[in-house]
Amino acid sequence: MIRAKGFGWRHAGRKAWAVRGLDLRVERGERVLLLGASGAGKSTLLAALAGLLAADSGEREGTVEVDGRVGIVFQDPETQIVMARAGDDVAFGLENHAVPPAAIWSRVDGALARVGFPYGRDRSTAALSGGEQQRLALAGALALRPDVLLLDEPTANLDPAGAGLVRGALREALDPGTTTVLVEHRVAEALPLVDRVVVLEPGGGVRADGPPDEIFATQGDRLVAEGVWVPGRPVEPRHACAPPGEALLTAEKATIRDRLAAVDLLVREGESLAILGPNGSGKSTLALLLGGLLKPDGGRIAATAALAGPDAATPPHRWRAPALARRIGSVFQDPEHQFVTSTVYDELALGPRRTGMPDGAVRSTVDGLLSRLRLDRLAAANPYTLSGGEARRLSVATALAAAPALLVLDEPTFGQDRRTWVELVDLLAGLRDEGRGIVTVTHDPDFVAALADRTVHLRANQETL
């Protein structure tokens, strides 16, 4: 079903190969989990299997062959949503494959039901949360009844209930003959879906290949050291070393019509606050409000003198950009939404330069962040060529570059391997212990257990719990 021989790919502008010397054969109906550290080439291999690596976007070696129809779900669901209505989006692929019109809508409805999509066909795709978009993207792939299904972190942006629905759909909805290749950092949750594990060597080919139990027995310690989430290897929590300090920011009955019900919230120095709740409850909207990037329709967001000094009487959404960057750093749910330059280095330097930091201090700040977040070898790379985990670390680094007193992060651990996840948690714990305020929107229960000093739960269309 899938055959790769000596396959290699190097992205344009990169010195290192994302994948090289890869030999792989997958038979019809096999369910394969790809493992490897962030940047090991897992997403690149999926793109190659889907025929999505354009000849002018990099250098290729060897061959890749796939028999049959391929469906793919990307890390970022927005990249494959093309229509304004949910039903039309699922139907788009069927129309392009010349499925008879009389058969289209029953297949659309069936696919939406299998992934637990909570709305009807007419739901606006622009009104969907990230997790809802992911379920819609999966429905579009399943509706095609693919011979090969490629899944790149299919549950990363979902709440636990939504992730369970998607995993259940994958268990129940796939035909026995459908070949599946899955990339998933949360290995324990993925294991019931697969019967084979393939470990990729960063910049190389296949290092290990076999049944899950055999791979973890022989490779477990090495995989943990390299950043793979091996089942049964917990992470120690990072508790605060001191009580929280002064208030930095408050939300008082803050609302956004149709997106966020009234929220009362207090953010303090030296505290890590986690915002939890199901998809569609307004978590990302609340993050934008707290970050000064959105004006509330009702209620207010107010800064204290500890955060804003003489500007405390002015709401954050009215601060000038340099002042906002010095006070509040935001990390968006989609990292690419905040990239505006052509290199990783310039992306990190942009914020400090805008705040008037001297050139020497800018270089020192950027070099420190590149090293700390394992991005130093990518300084000259285009941000849009990074893997999902690398792009997430860059988005966090850009928020840190101006040294703000408050960080607001939307799903910061998405796409991270174990090593970079631990390093990111340690970094945020250190900033909290220095007195920074940390607010995180997350679906990651391990992150909450490791770092959260306090949690706030949102319910859809209701006030905070």
Image: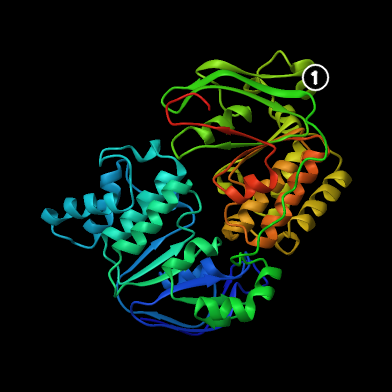
- Whether residue 299 is visible here, answered yes or no, is yes
363 to 275, vertically: above or below: below
* SS type, badge 1: helix
Q: Work out which residue is located at the far right of the displayed protein and give it.
A: 360
- Whether residue 81 is visible here, answered yes or no, is no
Left or right of 264? Residue 451 is right
The quarter in which the N terminus is drawn is: bottom left
203 to 234, vertically: above or below: below
Q: Residues within 10 Å of mark 1 (few under 14, many from 20)?
A: few
Left or right of 403? Residue 386 is left
Quarter assignment of residue 452: top right
Label 1 belongs to which residue? 309
Residue at position x 75%, y 36% in the image = 354
Describe the colour scheme in one phrase. Answer: rainbow
| Number of numbered discs visible in the structure rendering | 1
2 to 337, vertically: above or below: below
450 to 381, vertically: above or below: above
Q: Nearer the viewer, residue 170 or 286?
A: 170
Quarter assignment of residue 361: top right
Q: Amino acid at mark 1?
A: Gly
Residue at position x 53%, y 36% in the image = 284
Q: Work out which residue is located at the far left of the displayed protein and give it.
A: 102
Residue 90, horizontal then vertical, whole percent: 28, 51
Left or right of 65? Residue 361 is right
Residue 47, horizontal then vertical, whole percent: 46, 68
Left or right of 69? Residue 371 is right
Residue 174, horizontal then vertical, whole percent: 30, 66
Q: Nearer the viewer, residue 282 or 86?
A: 282
Residue at position x 56%, y 62% in the image = 185
Q: Work out which residue is located at the far top of the displayed protein and give it.
A: 313
